[in-house]
Image (tube, rainbow, N blue to C red):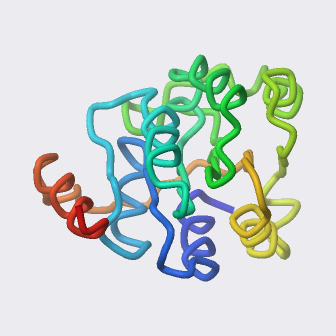
Amino acid sequence: MKGAEVISKLNNVLSGEELIVSSNGNVSRQAFHLLPQPQLYLRGSMGLPVPIGLGLALALPGKTVIVLTGDGNFLMGLSSLATVAYLQPLNLKIIILDNELYSTTGGQETVSSNMGYLELVLGMGVQNINSIDSIEKEDVIEKILSDTIKDPGLQVLHIKVEEDTISLENIPWHPVEIKERFLKQLDI
């Protein structure tokens, strides 16, 4: 299963009330085209989806905050997971789409194939971690996504996905416009 297919399945389990922070590059483009708008699409911000999601989760404890990130982006900001584990925001859900590549910049390999995500996240102090292979679990991926979003407490879901070759238009909004649309949604 490809990352875009997982994102499409995520759309089926959203209530429309969640706030989604998507990492720059392909993941943001896929979120823009496949999920409800507006969300917070990051651009030029490698490694920042988790800390930005953490800030939103702490500032808006009544909202479910979903961080949708690729493995390269997650690994770039790995140190923020220690803060997430320490603070344990109950409304934060982190979904890692792992294709073992920096897809947006040309398909260079990440170190993800050498990682034990389950052990890493547990070792940081996050107790609710699920690591699955979307190809082996394709028939239940929607239920796993739903459980991750609806189960109480901090959740991390690591999903092994196939390389995505889907070609989508860039997000047409300037970063300032992305921010303004997102804040308008929050009624701030």
What residue lies at 52% left-to-right and 23% top-to-bottom? 77
Q: Quadrant of residue 136?
A: bottom right
Q: Quadrant of residue 111?
A: top right
What residue lies at 63% left-to-right and 42% top-to-bottom? 99
Residue 14 in percent (x, y) is at: 57, 77
Residue 52 in percent (x, y) is at: 42, 38
Residue 70 in percent (x, y) is at: 55, 41
Left of 65 or right of it: where is 140? right
Left of 92 or right of it: where is 20? left
What residue lies at 64% left-to-right and 45% top-to-bottom? 96
Foreground of the two, 136 or 23: 23
Q: Quadrant of the C terminus?
A: bottom left
- Taking 141 as reference, is 52 above or below it? above
Foreground of the two, 141 or 95: 95
Left of 183 or right of it: where is 97? right
Residue 156 in percent (x, y) is at: 73, 45
Q: Quadrant of the N terminus?
A: bottom right
Q: How many marks?
A: 0
- Taking 168 as reference, is 54 above or below it? above
What residue lies at 64% left-to-right and 27% top-to-bottom? 81
